[in-house]
Image (cartoon, rainbow, N blue to C red):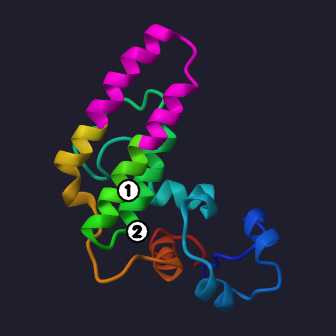
């Protein structure tokens, strides 16, 4: 069985020391910062729709795209999609602030705008609309489907 609460998550170990697996799943919301590398690899694919035919270059935005993929995987309602898109834009803008080369940064502003616009126009089909947000149990199921923890 795949377990979400183990030594591979030192941040969780420090914050939630003493909780068992079931208590942990019931107490702590599933968030991107808690994912392991394997979980990110299964859920996130960088920029471009997961399973889609078009794979744009990552440029400097791979982490922002992964975070956005995770938020789309969590899903729930339309306002959660809007929140995920807003966070995506915010993460790309934070990335732009770290680029030293002025010309490259200006060019990346255009790329970021195109990425965000593409998500707003074409992203609806990739968002998990459901009656509730996905959580740890869903993550365990997905990981077991991909052969982890069997």
The residue wearing badge 1 is 84
Residue 94 in the magenta stretch? The answer is yes
Marks 1 and 2 sit apart, C-alpha to C-alpha, by 10 Å
Mark sitting earlier along the chain (1/2): 2
Quadrant in the picture for the C terminus: bottom right
What percent of the width, then of the height, locates residue 125?
A: 19, 59
Q: Are marks 1 and 2 in contact (CB under 8 Å)?
A: yes
Label of residue 33 in the image: none
In depth, the one of 68 and 9 nearer the eye is 68
Tell me which residue sits at (65%, 91%) in the image: 22
Numbered disc 2: secondary structure: helix
In depth, the one of 131 and 6 nearer the eye is 131
Query: What are the residue bounds of the magenta stretch?
Result: 90-115
Residue 89's place in the image compared with 112, above or below, is below
Residue 44 in the magenta stretch? The answer is no
Numbered disc 1: secondary structure: helix
Would you identify the image quadrant in which residue 23 lies?
A: bottom right
Label of residue 74 in the image: 2
């Amino acid at each position: 069985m795949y377990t979400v609460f183990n030594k591979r998550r030192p941040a969780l170990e420090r914050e939630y020391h003493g909780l068992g697996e079931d208590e942990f799943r019931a107490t702590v919301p599933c968030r991107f910062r808690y994912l392991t590398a394997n979980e990110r690899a299964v859920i996130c694919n960088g920029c471009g729709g997961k399973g889609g035919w078009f794979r744009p270059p990552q440029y400097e935005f791979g982490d922002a795209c992964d975070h956005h993929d995770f938020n789309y995987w969590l899903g729930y309602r339309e306002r959660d999609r809007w929140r995920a898109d807003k966070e995506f834009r915010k993460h790309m803008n934070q990335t732009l602030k770290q680029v030293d080369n002025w010309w490259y940064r200006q060019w990346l502003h255009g790329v970021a705008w195109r990425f965000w616009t593409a998500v707003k126009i074409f992203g609806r089909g990739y968002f998990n609309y459901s009656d509730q947000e996905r959580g740890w149990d869903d993550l365990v199921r997905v990981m077991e489907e991909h052969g982890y923890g069997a």
